[in-house]
Amino acid sequence: MRIDVVTIFPEMFAAIRESGMTRRALAGGQFELCVWNPRQYSGDNYRRVDDRPYGGGPGMVMMAEPLAGALDAARQAAGGRVIYLTPQGRPLTQSVVGRLALEPALVLLAGRYEGVDERLIETEVDEELSIGDYVLSGGELPAMVLVEALVRCLPGVLGNEESAQDDSFSGGLLDWPQYTRPEQFAGHEVPAVLLGGNHGAIRRWRLKQALGRTWLRRPDLLAGRELNDEEQELLESFKNEQKEMENSR
Ligand code: 9WO
């Protein structure tokens, strides 16, 4: 997959070029990352990309022309739908990530200041996405969030092809709790079932914990998901144990 990013802070993307899974995926050729700076497409002698808002008020707005120049250059080099990262966008979910990861190329637009000229959005943007209900100083970190979520979905990136499927949300549930050595930490033990080597019992315990946590912390996720007979039984048992714990407090 090829990802092109339009940003006035291209150096921020060193964070994903130089570290972790995204660095390995770049080295392995599973994805390509190119950045385009709108300042290079500004007709202005001072390379300005922002101007005062029509109608007045505080702050500055990103001008349509330099952004259109950078977006057109990115599209000519790679093609791909244009995605604008903004609090006004549709929520980014794992299912949106899964759909976008099937595209051969995407162009991400990271804004700054108080936003971008609406006519640029109308004419050049295919989709608007939000990573959550908060305001940042720009779309670069949300763009990197999207890149990381996309790259870990690409074939051959995680090595262990199962682990992407196991994660939170891939099955529509939160993760089960994880433990490693030592067997005791701060007076807390590793659950005995995980030390017993009964793989059927371990699978059922993990599924039960995943269902229970999702019920406790994110009931909205369960509302949108059918439970099979085993899952219903495990969740009921979790709820009963939860009640016993509450009664003993
Ligand atoms: C700043 C501002 C200041 C005064 C009055 C209104 C205002 N709106 C904004 C604003 O939304 N600025 C954005 C900064 C413009 C687009 C890039 N910026 C951004 C993107 N902040 N947060 C995001 C973002 C993107 C995706 N998901 C979550 C947050």
Image (cartoon, rainbow, N blue to C red):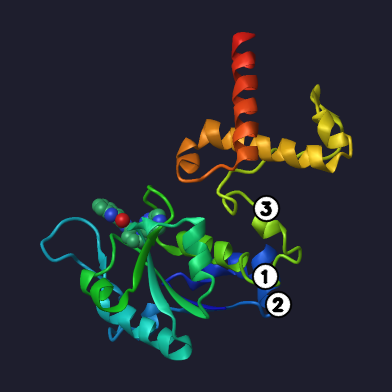
Up/down of 245 relative to 45, above or below: above
Residue underneath mark 3: 166
Name which residue type carries label 2. Ala
- Front residue of 28/91: it is 91
Comparing labels 2 and 3, the label whose residue is closer to the camera? 3
Residue at the top extreme?
Answer: 248
Q: Position of residue 240 (x, y in %)?
A: 62, 21
Q: Quadrant of residue 19?
A: bottom right
Question: Which residue is the extreme one toward the bottom?
Answer: 76
Q: What x and y, as percent, mark residue 47?
A: 33, 80
Residue drawn at 26 percent across, 77 percent down: 64
Q: Mark 2 near mark 3, Cβ–Cβ under 8 Å?
A: no
Asked if 38 appears above or below 148 in the picture, the reply is below
Which residue is rendered at x = 36% and y = 86% of the image? 72
- Residue 196 place in picture, x, y as percent: 89, 35
Report if the CB atoms under discs 1 and 2 are less than 8 Å apart: yes
